[in-house]
């Protein structure tokens, strides 16, 4: 087993990996850009290494600096999380060359499935139905125009080197194709360091259903059932659940077996997700393989009882899967809401700024995976995800009610967070009935606004927090006048009282 793992990521996923490592007795190394110096993942890791300026291209996407950080700290393995370098086969190959274990698929498999075009080619050879689309990266605009005409509009521009909605653009007419390709290439380059994009036929109003898989280094492969991910904005998921309301046992089994066949065809190992589009007639089509841990992995953990990060580490360390397909069961229902620093009333515009107050929900069946704290300044440089709220219930109705209550209890002040929007989505009759497709938000929430009551309630809460903040600036812990008249913003550390960091060290690269 590894003694020390470097986490080549930031935010809530880095914190999630740190917690799994801590439970396994593994020391962790965080990396951070200049703007993330005081980030939560930096505070919670055993060691932290500065790797460059705020732009991801100069820090979190800098393979040389990350390898150097691993060498400087004696890390034996690197966990890439999701995004950034997680699906970069060149980085996985570099880790192998440097005798560092990449906690993910081997570089050969990653080359096949991490690149969406190669993945489509591999799946087609394996006899798995794929969505109509290009089978190679276009070398010029003329090729894209010709392909779009053959596919028939609408088409969708997709990044070849990554997922998460980055680089995606829907194109309804030929005149919009060139600007969509250019915008998609810019976004793909910024997110993954690779500007390659291609075209697929855009299927209107399907369900987005994915299958979680685990594969060890000895040919053992299992699927951990499905996740329904149809609630999306800007082609990025915001609400996920399992089981899917659309699947019966037969369809679940067929899709699960297809996912296993897909990863075996690629010689895949470690954790991954095979994504499908499901049409109204229950036909499913291969969409892509996400060759990494998914943002929405917690819902699978809650219904299967497995820690997926732990499983990733065990597989990467050379252990066999300790269970077979026949040992796995789904229990209850789980739902996840992604909490973003963005304003749904303004087209989900990302927002930066200081979190002035934070209260997270709790209670039976409630889990929060967070990468932020009160007083943290959310930067503008990265994906705006702050946290994930996950609930479990014995039934889907129980889970929906629990999620609505937890969203009620969740408070984030200082920046927009979309909590009210998520609550309205969870309470919508079509969601409660399980009738969800990728058109859910455009169809039912195109002109969503906060109610006046919600605005008033948030305003009153903000005033109460501000008043409490003023009292704390001028009084001591017992309510007596403070000895110093200097008015300071209370930090999270002052709020804790006496504290120390157990041996964490900081390095510069």
Image: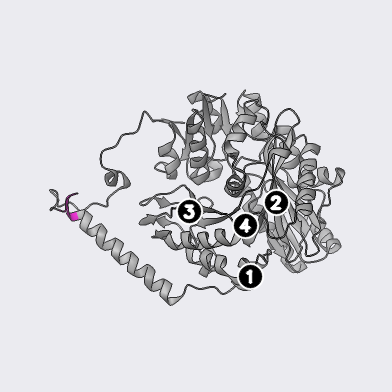
Q: Earlier in the sequence, mark 3 or mark 4?
A: 4
**Label 4 crowd (10 A; few <14 / some 14-19 / many >=20):** some
Q: Which residue is mark 3?
A: 380
Q: Nearer the viewer, mark 3 or mark 1?
A: 1
Helix, strand or loop at label 3? It is: loop
Spatial CA span between label 2 and label 1:
21 Å
- From where the camera sits, is residue 118 visible? yes
Above or below for 246 versus 311: below
Q: Nearer the viewer, mark 2 or mark 1?
A: 1
Spatial CA span between label 4 and label 1:
20 Å
x and y percentages locating residue 486 in the rendered image: 17, 51
Q: Nearer the viewer, residue 489 or 215?
A: 215
Q: Which residue is mark 2?
A: 210
Q: Which residue is mark 4?
A: 236
Q: Which mark is residue 382?
A: none
x and y percentages locating residue 341 in the rendered image: 48, 58
Spatial CA span between label 3 and label 1:
34 Å
Query: Would you say 442 lies left or right of 160 here?
Result: left
Q: Nearer the viewer, mark 3 or mark 4?
A: 4
Q: Magenta span covers which residues?
A: 474-479
């Amino acid at each position: 087993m590894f003694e020390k793992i470097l986490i080549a990521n930031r935010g809530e996923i880095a914190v999630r990996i740190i917690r799994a490592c801590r439970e396994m007795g593994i020391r962790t190394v965080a990396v951070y850009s200049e703007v993330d110096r005081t980030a939560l993942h930096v505070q919670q890791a055993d060691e932290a290494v500065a790797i460059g300026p705020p732009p991801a291209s100069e820090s979190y996407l800098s393979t040389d600096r990350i390898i150097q950080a691993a060498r400087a700290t004696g890390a034996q393995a690197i966990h890439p999380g999701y995004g950034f370098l997680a699906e970069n086969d060149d980085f996985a190959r570099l880790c192998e060359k440097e005798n560092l274990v990449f906690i993910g698929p081997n570089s050969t498999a990653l080359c096949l499935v991490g690149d969406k075009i190669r993945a489509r080619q591999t799946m087609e050879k394996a006899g798995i139905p794929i969505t109509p689309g290009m089978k190679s990266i276009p070398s010029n605009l003329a090729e894209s125009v010709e392909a779009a005409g053959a596919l028939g509009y609408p088409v969708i521009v997709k990044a070849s080197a990554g997922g998460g909605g980055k680089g995606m653009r829907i194109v309804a007419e030929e005149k919009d194709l060139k600007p969509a390709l250019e915008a998609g290439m810019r976004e793909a380059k910024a997110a993954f360091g690779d500007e390659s994009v291609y075209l697929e036929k855009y299927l209107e109003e399907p369900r987005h259903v994915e299958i979680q898989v685990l594969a060890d280094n000895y040919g053992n492969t299992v699927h951990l059932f499905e996740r329904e991910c149809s609630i999306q904005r800007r082609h990025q998921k915001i609400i996920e659940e399992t089981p899917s309301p659309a699947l019966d046992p037969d369809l679940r089994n067929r899709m699960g077996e297809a996912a296993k066949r897909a990863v075996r065809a690629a010689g895949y190992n470690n954790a991954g997700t095979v994504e499908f589009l499901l049409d109204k007639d229950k036909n499913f089509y291969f969409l892509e393989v996400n060759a990494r841990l998914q943002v929405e992995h917690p819902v699978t953990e809650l219904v299967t009882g497995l820690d997926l990060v732990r499983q990733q580490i065990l597989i990467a360390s050379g252990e066999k899967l300790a269970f077979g397909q026949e040992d796995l069961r789904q229990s209850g229902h789980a739902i996840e809401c992604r909490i973003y620093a963005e304003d749904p009333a303004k087209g989900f515009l990302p927002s930066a700024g200081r979190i002035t107050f934070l209260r997270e929900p709790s209670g039976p069946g409630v889990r929060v995976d967070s990468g932020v704290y009160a007083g943290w300044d959310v930067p503008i440089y990265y994906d705006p995800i702050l946290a994930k709220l996950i609930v479990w219930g014995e039934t889907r109705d129980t889970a929906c009610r629990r999620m609505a209550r937890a969203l009620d209890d969740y408070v984030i002040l200082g920046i927009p967070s979309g909590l009210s929007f998520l609550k309205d989505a969870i309470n919508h009759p079509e969601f409660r009935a399980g009738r969800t497709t990728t058109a859910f938000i455009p169809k039912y929430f195109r002109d969503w606004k906060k109610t006046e009551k919600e605005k008033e309630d948030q305003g009153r809460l903000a005033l109460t927090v501000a008043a409490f903040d003023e009292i704390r600036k001028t009084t001591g812990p017992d309510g007596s006048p403070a000895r110093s008249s200097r008015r300071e913003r209370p930090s999270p550390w002052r709020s804790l009282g006496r504290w120390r960091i157990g041996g964490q060290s900081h390095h510069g690269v």
